[in-house]
Amino acid sequence: MTVAIDMGTSNTGSPARLDLEELLATRLLVQGNSGSGKSHLLRRLLEQSASWVQQCVVDPEGDFVTLAEKFGHVVVEADRSEHELTRIAGRIRQHRVSVVLNLEGLEADAQMRCAAAFLGGLFDAERDYWYPMLVVVDEAQLFAPAAAGEVSDEARKLSLGAMTNLMCRGRKRGLAGVIATQRLAKLAKNVAAEASNFLMGRTFLDIDMARAGDLLGMDKRSTEMFRDLERGHFIALGPALARRPLNIAIGAVETQARSTSPRLMPLPEARGEDAAELIFTPGADEDIRQPVRRTPQPAPRPTADILAQLSAPPPEPPDAGLFPEIDEKEREDAIAAVLAEILEDPDASYRSVAVLYQDFLVRCRIRRVPGAPPDLADFKRRFAVARAGVDTGTEQSEVWQQAMALAQTLSDDLQGVFLVLARAAVAGHPCPSDATLARAYGSHSTGRARRVLAHFEERDLIVLREDYSGNRIAAFPDLGCETGPGDPNGPAAGDVPAAAE
């Protein structure tokens, strides 16, 4: 059955239809300068398709929360932990509820982290819940920037990875990405390139017009038309819209955004002394606060004084006897205890590394761990070793050191899985099940665990074989050892087996 969504009227006077089923398979990109009508277009699409498909709106400005009043969308406020947002997203897919993720009021860094956690939860849902879902991301350039900005590099990578998964790999999971951006030049190319349907609105910069023209197959002279488009008018192209560029005017909507464009209003009639009285006299209900006096800036130091300070000999170090020496063994034992506490949480494997590292730092402060805490890279290595369940004797052995060196050749997200396998081989334990390896990877998907094993085998790190009972054995040619037979379809281990005593 074909579901045609009425988006408005074309320049020929005929209705502009959008094939919803085709859109779910081919995705949509909307571009236009501020004030061109992008949010109005997204609202029209959401309202017209609300009764046909589950919807999720990533809303950085809180404009789409009004959909809840008429169409029953549930507003998910982002003032929650990343882990909680991920779990909520999984339940959203399970129960097929349309939602609006309201990111209003958060800093850019927090918005990117929350959006990444939420989209990750939608993407990692169980296969049984892969129902069709329209995922609309307004101001997509905030979550998939083409270049690094003022946000942290880690937040940018998390958000960009989630957006890439949505646009590149979301189709098989039922996720249809609809992204809107003010400028194509600010949007990551690998995210924009996955869309097959385009709605291009008014834009003025040459670089944006050129990119829009390239996507629509227009020559340079034809791209001048983007400057002449009226508000709410877009050039449509794609299998779900039109086979040739078509000018359409977006129709009316039933709901309105909470924020509206400012309108001109006449100035008040108070002038002269009356206006001065209003300004300089505090109102009855106005808080009277003491003005903040700014400290005057110090005078710049002469260059000669700065050079003299730099050339002066360094001060004598303080007497080492005044400060207690740090017992390294005590410090290592305390760090190991903190890692063990984190691993006791059954949900720890499904949290992002950033969240786990923050939890680790807090626990170190609570336990008064002496010395500077390990940095993020050292924490990843320690956590991977702790999750593998390696005892002190095994960790100091030559074969385990070689396993650690092989793990360093892999990306951070694969090292933990490799070490869990290597530990089973070194200790002669049965080969871990797919569910156990998926948990070490931080996922519920056993298919993803099998793909990781296939990747290890392609890298010649392991050789997989089966015994006569169908159990799996993983051999490590470089380490000269192999695991015992293990059921690949067995349940996930509640805890990593302790080292043999």
Image (cartoon, helix red, strand yellow):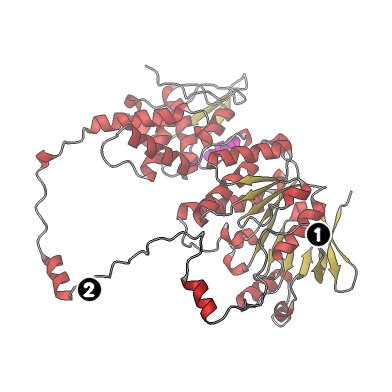
Q: Which residues are magenta?
A: 448-462
- The label shown at residue 240 is 1
Tell me residue 152's x, y (percent).
45, 55
Helix, strand or loop at label 2? It is loop
- Residue depicted at 46% across the width and 72% down the height: 280
Q: Nearer the viewer, mark 2 or mark 1?
A: 2
The amino acid type of the residue labelled 2 equals Ala
Compared across the picture, whether 198 is left or right of 60 comes to: right
Compared across the picture, whether 455 is left or right of 370 comes to: right
Place residue 203 in its image quadrant. bottom right
Helix, strand or loop at label 1? It is loop
Q: Which residue is mark 2?
A: 299
Answer with mark 2 or mark 1, whichever residue precedes in sequence.
Answer: 1
Say above or below: 368 vs 226: above
Question: Do the CB atoms of the residues marked 2 and 1 lie less than 8 Å apart?
Answer: no
From the viewer's side, name the closer residue of 37 and 317.
37
Tell me residue 465's x, y (percent).
57, 28
Tell me residue 302's x, y (percent).
17, 75
The amino acid type of the residue labelled 1 equals Ala
